Amino acid sequence: MSYLNYSAEQLRGFDNAHHLHPFTDHDELRASGVRIVTNAAGNYIFDSDGKRILDGMAGLWCVNVGYGREELAQAAYKQMRELAYYNTFFKTTHGPVALLAKRIAELAPSHLNQVFFGASGSESNDTAIRSVRHYWALKGKPEKQIIISRNDSYHGSTIAAVSMGGMGAMHSQLGPHLPGFTHVMAPYDFELANPEETRAEFGLRAARAVEEAIVEAGPENVAAFVGEPIQGAGGVKIPPETYWPEIQRICRKHDVLLMLDEVITGFGRTGEWFACQSMDIEPDTITVAKAITSGYQPLSAVIVSDEIADTLAQGGEYYHGYTYSGHPVACAVALENLDIIAREGLIERVREDTGPYLTQHLADVLSDHPLVGEVRGFGLLAAIEIVKDVTTRERFTPAGHAASVVRDRSIEAGFMMRAVGETMILSPPLTWTRETIEEAAAIVKQALDEAAEVLR
């Protein structure tokens, strides 16, 4: 049965009647109707009304090499013909997963050389949680269970990942919070810095909130601190340069592992293969997903340090895994995707050209707009703070409404970006050029102008 045999209206009806969407107000969605995305090419998506939309979110932070890549379709097709599926239980492996594990180890920092695969970032963050807790148990310190995270962090949607994350709205729907997780302030100086406090000073204060939590819980009870190098779904919160070095010092001082969630920042977004390389962070684990295949197949992984891997290997059978751990088709697509990123020099482009230009051009075009309190960026990640008063940074009420107005005007004008709270966020494909950036900035300015008329 092909969806091509049905009209757009029929498909909308089926969707409304049967499809529960992620992160959605379904009453509102069913009242307004869904947008049917029919195809995509390069940096653009197209809907059933024939509308072309420049994608400023790389799908959902993942389509790093852009849409319509024939090489990735062929990689999937060829692997499906040879070996569509087999598991990596039963002392078995296959070519794509072995080669991909090797490739990831070569790209990662030199002390991280072993990889555990999953199908989503949520799964792999669950794996990271279990791995660090099991590691400490094998080291004779089973009481080291607590994982410290941050407010507004996002680590996935499973019960464990939501508990580890710092999204209050998600916690409110979780029911009883899983034990063993605690949260501290985010490194978000736009809202949290004290008057007269420099950005560098704020970075140190935000890091020391982690140390305070470690001391309060007792270092003997704390397994790890976890953080996204740049908080993505929480609003592209970019920490001051003083933050991560202090975090690293604190973790080492108290014998606490450092877990990085690079589900968003991994594979080129910050101008290196991993953000930890851009920011000079030495993690014990790195969680990746999304751009590992540019979203063409579901795949995720946890890359672990040699110390953790060796300890787990000596601890007997590890009772953990997923049906699709190391799926051969997903791994084959990932290998080709990483080849494209390297072959086309996309990481170098982000680091040396489009990354700096995105932040600078957005600032040049938008910084004096009456709705814009701040423009910030790192690599091909950017955020625009929406305010009612640029001097006092007063927000509009109700919370989230103003940014939603900007988002809706932007999409209508042909540019897809996301609203998180009162922050507009961008995470485009790495295939963007300066011309694409200029096209996006012009549409964002138009959307802001239209939103200002509505909001004022």
Image: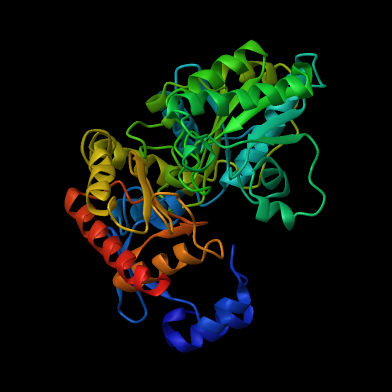
* Residue at image location 75% in from the left, 26% down from the top: 317
Is residue 146 visible to the viewer in this orientation of the structure?
yes
Residue 400 appears at what percent x and percent y? 52, 62
Measuring 34% from the left and 67% from the top, which residue is drawn there? 410
What number of labels is visible?
0
- The answer to whether residue 63 of the structure is visible from this angle is no
Q: Quadrant of residue 21?
A: bottom right
Q: Position of residue 389 (x, y in %)?
A: 41, 56
Does 254 appear above or below 154? above
Outermost top residue: 253
Q: Taking 129 as reference, is 93 left or right?
A: left
- Relative to the observer, which residue lies in front, 115 or 180? 180
Q: Position of residue 173 (x, y in %)?
A: 73, 58
User: Quick check: 390 left or right of 112?
Assistant: left
Residue 429 appears at what percent x and percent y? 32, 50
Which colour scheme appears in the figure? Answer: rainbow
- The answer to which of 275 and 195 lies nearer the viewer is 195
Q: Is residue 219 above or below residue 321?
A: above
> Which residue is more in the foreground, 177 or 307?
177
Q: In the picture, which quadrant includes the C terminus?
A: bottom left
